[in-house]
Image (tube, rainbow, N blue to C red):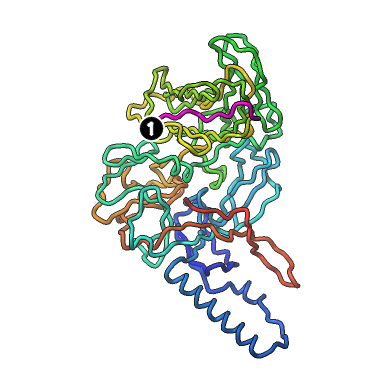
Amino acid sequence: MIAPTAFGAASASRSLSSPHDHFDGLVAATPMSPLIADQVKPRVVTLRSGFVRQTIEFLIALSLAIMVFRTFTAEAYVVPTGSMAPTLLGNHEEVACPSCGIRFALGIDEDGRAGQPVCPNCGEDKLDGVPIVPCSGDRLLVQKGLYDFKRPRRWEVAVFHFPAEPTQAYVKRVVGLPGESIQILRGDIYINGKIARKSLQEQRAIRIPVYDSQYVSQDANRVPRFIFRHGRPQSGLTSAWRTEGPLLIHDPAEATENATDWVEYRHRDPDRAQYTPIYDFNPYNGGELRGENRVPDLMLEARLIVGNDVPTVDVRLNSGADRFLITLPFHEDALPQVRRNNQAVALAHAVPIPSTPGTPPSSRVLEASIMDHRLSVSLDGVPLFDPVDYDNPAVGYGSDVSPIGVGVRRGSLTIERFKVFRDVYYTSALANTPKRPFGVDEPYKLGLDSFFVLGDNSSVSNDSRFWSSSPVVRGDLFLGKPFLVHLPGQVVPLKVFGRSVYWVPDPREIRYIR
């Protein structure tokens, strides 16, 4: 749910909803919050009447311009709940982990209560008394009238009137389009019996953070997140990898025939406190609501400094029982190569990696993902080949405790930042509520001008799956597309000119919605 807010105005309202309840509407904006309005006190000054008249005319024109802008172009809404977290945040607390230093959002209910905080990065759960900052829900700017000229696209975030209560606005992600048959299977969306895939840009918009090496936990030596392996486990070869704070560094070393020196990520589950496969845990919901579903759809984003003495960099990605090996020739006259389960994969439109011999190596951003039975690889935002799609996933789960690895045979390589993400896993249950969902046990056929929408925080989102009468949003109910989180705020008591102010803008969280 969302509610409209005044364009650019800050609201003092604490009308919140529990991150575990099923009220997902948006909150509407008011012309100006009384809390802010009563602080705008005009000073008495002596000015010439001509200047005063010009000022009044300017203010009137500005007010009319804002009204026109709001009426025909954009409207602001507040998100009070966490059904779209972490893409969009409802009312929450910002928690600072004392172990690794990362900050994360924990949803709070209408009475100001929050669940048990658990750090999503290092798993620290002894967080009583740590610094927290209450924050209001995200304030969205919504492009109105857009859907009068175009229909909502799949994977697009949209604001619409809730069919069961048309005066209430909701924000969700569109996944099913008119005339399609939609079904949720093993966390993925299937359209007309085939898996619905995302482009790399859509993956970036939906992905959920799992780990960030920039935030090193205090117990990193006791429970390391990376292991170093040179060649096969029983080869006895010494690895040239080492850690230096948040950096992963491979020192120059003599090449060993047929032996790649690997740094492998090991996943430590936040709410299980042990090495496990990656599950669909969402820290916004608190530690009481555990992740119950294995997520095979993963993405690596790594910032690399590749020395001129490194011929190739290997990347390994595991997805369920499938194992992909990507070979990237940084300083060899060759094209990227991919092997799936030890079998070569034909690549379409593969391009060589641009190299600059003789110049100091610079930082490169590598993205590699397996989502929706699709392998995508890009360097500095440029795809290195067309996505590799497959419809015959290997049966089973495989060993997913270490699902990602980066390896070299020789030379100097520094990984400045190693980030792991997962895809949204669409569940068949709503926070353990015994409800038979639409589009899960069997496909649901959408009619003309009918759409199916879901929340990113799937385990607590009241969306098309669980609406009592019908899962459909008609095309005429769409209000617009949110494009910007503007003026996100912290609820921080301050004294300003003798008055208490409980909401201040937090410019760190201003962001575009893709």
Residue under the image location 51 percent in, 32 percent down: 278
Q: Is residue 359 magenta?
A: yes
Where is residue 467? Give x, y as percent.
35, 54
Which percent across, then down, holds residue 402?
Answer: 54, 25
The residue carrying pointer 1 sits among few (fewer than 14), some (14 to 19) or many (20 or more) residues within 10 Å by Cα, namely many
**Residue 148 is at least partly visible in this image:** yes
Question: Of helix, strand and loop, which one carries label 1?
Answer: loop
Instruction: Considering the whole magenta stretch, tell me its main secondary structure.
Output: loop
**Quadrant hosting residue 235:** top right
Q: Is residue 146 above or below residue 337?
A: below
How far across and how far down the image is residue 79, in percent?
A: 51, 59
Q: Residue furthest bottom?
A: 49
Identify which residue, 70 or 366, lies in the foreground. 366
> Which residue is rendered at x = 51% and y = 67% of the image?
5
In the rendered image, which quarter is residue 193 located in? top left
- Horizontal side, residue 318 vs residue 54: left or right: left
Rendered location of residue 410, percent (x, y): 61, 17
Q: Amino acid at mark 1?
A: His
| Horizontal relation, residue 74 to residue 183: left or right | right
Bounds of the magenta segment: 350-360
Please name whichever residue, 111 or 390, is drawn nearer the observer in this view of the structure: 390
| Position of 154 relative to 337 (above/below) | below
Query: In the depicted view, which residue is nearer to us: 372 or 274?
Result: 372
- Quadrant location of the N terminus in the rendered image: bottom left
Extreme residue toward the front, this view = 358
Please tell me whether residue 478 is drawn above or below residue 230 in the rendered image. below
Q: Nearer the viewer, residue 170 or 150?
A: 150
**Residue at screen point 64% across, 89% down:** 50
Would you say 207 lies left or right of 188 here? right
Residue bearing the label numbered 1: 373
Task: Name the residue: 68% across, 89% down.
Answer: 48
Above or below — where is 497 with respect to 402? below
